[in-house]
Amino acid sequence: YSTDGWATVREAPATWGWMSMDDHLENWRFSIPAGVLTDELVFAVRYEVDGEVYWDNNLERDYTLATPAGVETSIPARY
C-alpha cells in the first residue's frame, strides 16, 4: 500500500475471507497502523496460491480508501 502516490510502498499482511456466490467479489481483511495514514491510501492485493503469485489492482486503477480525519487507532479495511 502507499500513502504518497506510490513514491514509497509498504506491505501489510492480509487474510482472505470469502468469495461471493457468483465469484465476482472477494473479501480480504487487513489492518494499517494509524500512524501511517494520510488523506488517501491506495493499494493492490498480492497473493500466492500453490507457488503461483497473483495480483489484483482493481483493473489497473488500484484500490483507494479515503482516510477519516482524526483517526487514532488502526482501521480494519475490508473489500
Image: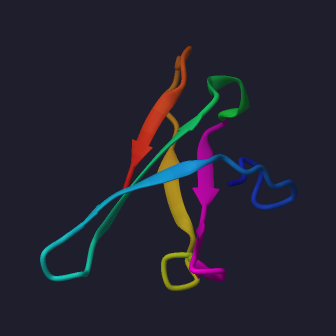
- The residue at 27%/72% (across/down) is 25
Q: Nearer the viewer, residue 58 or 38?
A: 58
Q: Position of residue 10 (x, y in %)?
A: 77, 49
On the rendered structure, is 67 left or right of 46? left
On the rendered structure, is 41 left or right of 77? right
Q: Position of residue 50 (x, y in %)?
A: 57, 80
Say above or below: 1 vs 52. above
Say above or below: 14 vs 56. above
The verdict on residue 58 being magenta is: no
Q: Which of 6 and 26 is in front in this view?
A: 26
- The residue at 60%/78% (across/down) is 55
| In the image, farthest residue toward the front | 50
| In the image, farthest residue toward the left | 21
Say above or below: 8 vs 53. above
Q: Specify how the rendered protein is coloured.
A: rainbow
Among the 4 quarters of the image, the one containing residue 33: top right
Q: Position of residue 3 (x, y in %)?
A: 71, 47
**Is the magenta region chiefly helix, strand or loop?**
strand
- The residue at 58%/83% (across/down) is 60
User: Which quadrant of the rendered structure holds the N terminus?
Assistant: bottom right
Q: Which segment did they paint magenta?
A: 38-55
- The residue at 72%/32% (across/down) is 36
Q: Where is residue 45 in the image (x, y as percent from the top left)?
A: 57, 66
Q: Number of callouts in the render? A: 0
The verdict on residue 49 being magenta is: yes
User: Which quadrant of the rendered structure holds the C terminus?
Assistant: bottom left
